[in-house]
Image: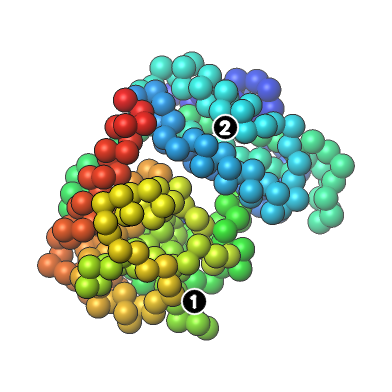
Amino acid sequence: MSVLGYFDGKFIDVENDKIIGMEDRGHQFGDGIYEATRFYNGKCFQLKRHLDRCMSSLKKVRMTVPYTADDLAKLHEELIEKSGFKNGVVYFQFTRGTAPRDHHFPNVKPHLSMSIRSSEVNEQQQAEGVKCFLTEDIRWHHCDIKSLNLLGNVLAKQAADDAGCYEAVLYRPDTKEVTECGSSNFFMIKDGVLWSHPTNNLILKGITLSVLLEDIAPAIGVKVMEKEFTPEFALTADEAFITSTSLEVTPCIELGGKVIGNGKIGEITLKLQKAYKEAVKKECF
Ligand code: PMP
């Protein structure tokens, strides 16, 4: 099966065109940033927020690229049209280019690579929820950058998988604060209030999180507390859920071996999940 993609100005077949060299900085150093967007009915949801975050990640890693946000939006449109897919995910990344291995920035052009895959939202998982593993956040302190360096995330997600869990919920061992998950954001509900880690350098400001906290929660009257909380407090949650572009709002029904609430999707989680789907419908259909 071939996978449609794009690399530095050309549409390519991701599986058969071997385009990345040994000395690509992404390969050698994890020196790059990425984004993943979801499209519904042939239209990207919240593309502007994704592209703004991409530009912000590029700036934070001091990478200048010969693409504007508009160029990237056009490439999304072209990829979706060429693929013929209705629903799916576009992955794209910039690396600092290819140069003989040396830590300093090389004087070469960055690479842009993109790929598109067809996929549907997992409705069953969203209805039934997932079990989450609780583990230490061993990552660096710039988690607001969507960097290619995902080793801390990979190790946490593998530990979760080894324990029969879907996702790893992370906490900083020094400050005892729950940050986020291996590849999603974490939320808990206690006494009707929605708790979320402040959007600082310790978490990625998820686009799904932004839609929930900035658009949906105020619109449907859910009270939000953006404040650090401990793993112990998380274990007392009435409800909990995780969010990402591909997961949307997915209930967390078990955390660190403890059942959350009655082990089923909570009332407020369901409200937020429904409102998120409404927002998708409004924007993409
Ligand atoms: N945190 C991490 C570490 C992630 O990898 C992701 C997924 N990209 C998220 C949060 C959720 O971000 P978004 O809602 O933009 O997909």
Do residues under tags 2 and 1 come within 8 Å of each other at their CB atoms? no
121 or 197, nearer to the observer: 197
User: In the rendered image, which quarter is residue 197 located in?
Assistant: bottom left
User: In the rendered image, which quarter is residue 43 located in?
Assistant: top left
Residue 285: image location, x then y, percent: 31, 25
**Seen in the image, is 5 located left or right of residue 166?**
right
Q: Which residue is drawn at 43% across and 72% down?
A: 227
Q: Which amino acid does label 1 sit on?
A: Arg
Residue 279: image location, x then y, percent: 32, 38
The image shows residue 22, relative to residue 255, as above or below, that is above
Q: Residue at x 41, y 35 (%)?
A: 45
**Seen in the image, is 150 located left or right of residue 177?**
right
Quarter of the image where the N terminus is located: top left
Q: What residue type is labelled 2?
A: Met
Residue ID for mark 1: 172
104 or 179, nearer to the observer: 179
Secondary structure under tag 2 reads strand
Q: Is residue 135 visible?
A: no
| Number of other residues with Cα within 10 Å of mark 1, as a class: few under 14, some 14 to 19, many 20 or more | some
Query: Disc 2 or disc 1, which is closer to the eye?
Result: 1
The image shows residue 171, relative to residue 185, as above or below, that is below
Q: Is label 2's Cβ within 8 Å of ligand 1?
A: no
Residue 256: image location, x then y, percent: 30, 73
Residue ID for mark 2: 114
| Number of other residues with Cα within 10 Å of mark 2, as a class: few under 14, some 14 to 19, many 20 or more | many
The image shows residue 210, relative to residue 4, as above or below, that is below
Distance between the Cα atoms at labels 2 and 1?
A: 33 Å
Whichever of callouts 2 and 1 sits on the residue coming sooner in the sequence is 2
Q: Which residue is drawn at 69% across and 31% down?
A: 67
38 or 8, nearer to the observer: 38
